[in-house]
Image (cartoon, rainbow, N blue to C red):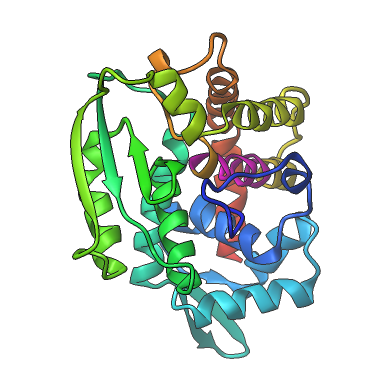
Amino acid sequence: MPISGTTTPVLTRRQSVSPPSARSLLLTVLGELVLPAEGPVWTSALLHVLDGLGVEEKSARQAIARTAADGWITSARDGRRVRWELAPPGRGLLTEGAARIYAAGGHASWDGTWLVVLASVPETQRRMRHQLQTRLAWAGFGNPTAGLWVSPHRARSPEVARIIADLGLESAALSFVGPYGAIGSEAALVARAWDLDEVAGQYELFLDEFNEGEPRHGDATMFAQIRLVHSWRRFPFVDPGLPDQLLPDNWAGHRARALFDRKHSAWTPEARKRWAELIAD
């Protein structure tokens, strides 16, 4: 998750290896297992997976309750047992998130144009300021200087318009699209907008963590799949998905993306088979 109070949300190496929270792991489970299965699931199935990921039952139940309170999931009682299913807002957000997560590390062709947004929030409105920073970073924008946001993804204009409208900043924000001008260099702009050394370091940590070893069948594969996706979830926040023309040579993100695709494809059938067994009990 992004760090509040920074102009460009990033993860430090210390934070990247800190234990994930029960809530964040639950969201990964919902997106990776519950969303594609579509049907309701027993509380016991969620607790089983979270336990296998190192989450104590009390923390797991609190995470489920908080997620329900936020409107992401809804419950239905069947005797003494409880089933959970995704509420429409949760399904929509997880679907959007999954699309961005699975696209992370991929870098499409580029026509050389930039999407530039002028939008700022006073220091006194810290909550809104944080929301603007977080949501624009998720959309792949960098923040080279206060109030200025840039991205090579011009097609994300509608997404930015929604962010600005949601925050009520329409009267104070401006945007335009065009090529880089004659003053300075695109390399300098990229260096000011994003810390690519830090992003590359995060990819190297991912490669170190998942490059070796294969889980056994059943639970082990399902738990490994969740850990893989959960670790990969950070990259839409830290990697803006720059085109190759703007990236260093031998970009670690390309190698990490290839590893993620390979492991995810290999583990998904067994992980979903085991999940289907759990929710059928």
Looking at the image, how many numbered discs can be counted on the residues? 0
**Would residue 37 be seen by someone viewing this image from the given angle?**
no
Q: Quadrant of the C terminus?
A: bottom right
Residue 152 lies in the magenta stretch: no
Q: In the image, residue 61 lies at what x, y percent?
A: 69, 77
**Would residue 116 be seen by someone viewing this image from the given angle?**
yes
Q: Image quarter for residue 228?
A: top right
Question: Which residue lies most toward the top here?
Answer: 249
Q: Image quarter for residue 12?
A: top right
Q: Which residue shows up at 29% across the image and 49% down it? A: 118
Q: In the image, residue 14 lies at what x, y percent?
A: 79, 44
Q: Is residue 217 above or below residue 40?
A: above
Question: Which residue lies most toward the bottom here?
Answer: 79
Q: Is residue 32 above or below residue 192?
A: below
Residue 231 lies in the magenta stretch: yes
Relative side of 233 to 169, left or right: right
Front in this rendered view, residue 104 or 251: 251
Q: Image quarter for residue 173?
A: bottom left
Q: Which residue shows up at 21% across the image and 46% down it? A: 175
Q: In the image, residue 197 lies at what x, y percent?
A: 63, 26
Front in this rendered view, residue 176 or 81: 176
Relative side of 12 to 98, left or right: right
Q: Which residues are magenta?
A: 225-236
Q: Which residue shows up at 61% across the image and 55% down it? A: 3
Relative side of 251 to 212, left or right: left
